[in-house]
Image: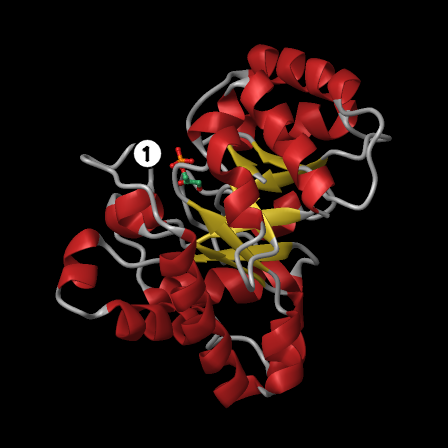
Amino acid sequence: MGNWKLNFNVGEASIYLHKLQKKIANYRDIEVVVAPTSLCLQPLSLQLERSKIKLGAQNAFYQDFGAYTGEISFAELRGLVDYCIIGHSERRYIFHEDDKMIAKKVAACIRNKITPVLCIGETESERSFGETADVIKDQLLGGLSEIGVEDVPKVIVAYEPVWAISSTKDAKIATPDEIAEVVEIIRANLKEVYGADISENVPILFGGSVKPTNAGAYLTTPGINGLLIGGASLILEQFTDIIEIAKRVK
Ligand code: 13P
């Protein structure tokens, strides 16, 4: 899944996707999703109507309609997108979204038949103070707190350590061991609250400075099912290289 963040206008996004469609015409078994800005979703959903490339939104508000100036809702996104990124660290730290708001967004997403990609991850200072397990538990269970157990299998979890996101100052590259350790924490929490079956089957993506050079190692990290890619998803060659690697790994 490529998270384009606040990049590419409608024209740029459309040209990129034309090229991407040509490059990856021949693939099976893996899912390719791009998450452009909200303004691009309507035209791109028409462009991708018969394509295998799926669309994701980057954010929406939890109320379906009403006096909420400047917001768009999951109800509006219904039918336009298959996925929505929720709780990205940029939303948590720049836009002050807390676990309560994120939980309402996860519920609104599911209510509107969109798969939430719930992002969780510790900051560098939380990690250095040994708080990673607590932060992961709070963000994971907090984010799931407004949905019933029957809806938890409809959620995708993305582990994105804030210190590994390429736009973070002095970003570091996470090692597969560091990732595997946190994935274990995520699955242990899911198991404790929702049972072994759900814990084993909820897909977990990794995000943070994913590049063609490390995608293979991350995709073969125990418990990881896919990638959430920022910067490299904006560069067509890099994104297609990563897709090729995913095909091979699969
Ligand atoms: P980068 O791949 O640029 O580190 O971004 C990761 C991310 O935030 C994806 O949601």
- Mark 1 beta carbon near ligand 1 (under 8 Å): yes
Name the residue carrying label 1: 166
**What kind of colouring is applied to the model shown?**
secondary structure
Q: Quadrant of the N terminus?
A: top right
Task: Please tell me whether residue 205 is drawn above or below residue 187 in the rendered image.
Answer: above
Q: Secondary structure at mark 1?
A: loop
Q: Is residue 1 visible?
A: yes
In the shown orientation, is residue 16 left or right of residue 29? left
**Along the line of sight, which residue is nearer the eye, 167 or 96?**
167
- Quadrant position of residue 48: top right
Residue 95 visible, this orientation: no
Where is residue 56 drawn, in percent x and y? 61, 41
Residue type, mark 1 in image: Ser
Residue 224, percent from left and from top: 56, 58
Question: Eyeballing the image, is 56 above or below 64?
Answer: above
Q: What residue is rendered at 53% in x and 84% in y?
A: 191
Name the side, left or right, on which 112 lies relative to 146: right
For residue 63, above or below residue 12: below
The quadrant where ligand 1 appears is top left
Percent x, y of residue 38: 53, 33
Identify the residue shown where x is 57% and y is 85%: 194
Image position of 16 with respect to 29: above or below: above
> Which of the pair 33/200 is nearer the observer?
200
Occupied quadrant, residue 132 = bottom left
Callout 1: 10 Å neighbours few (<14), some, many (20+)? some
In the displayed structure image, the side of residue 62 where residue 133 appears, left or right: left
Instruction: Name the residue located 39 percent from the left edge and 42 percent from the top edge.
Output: 208
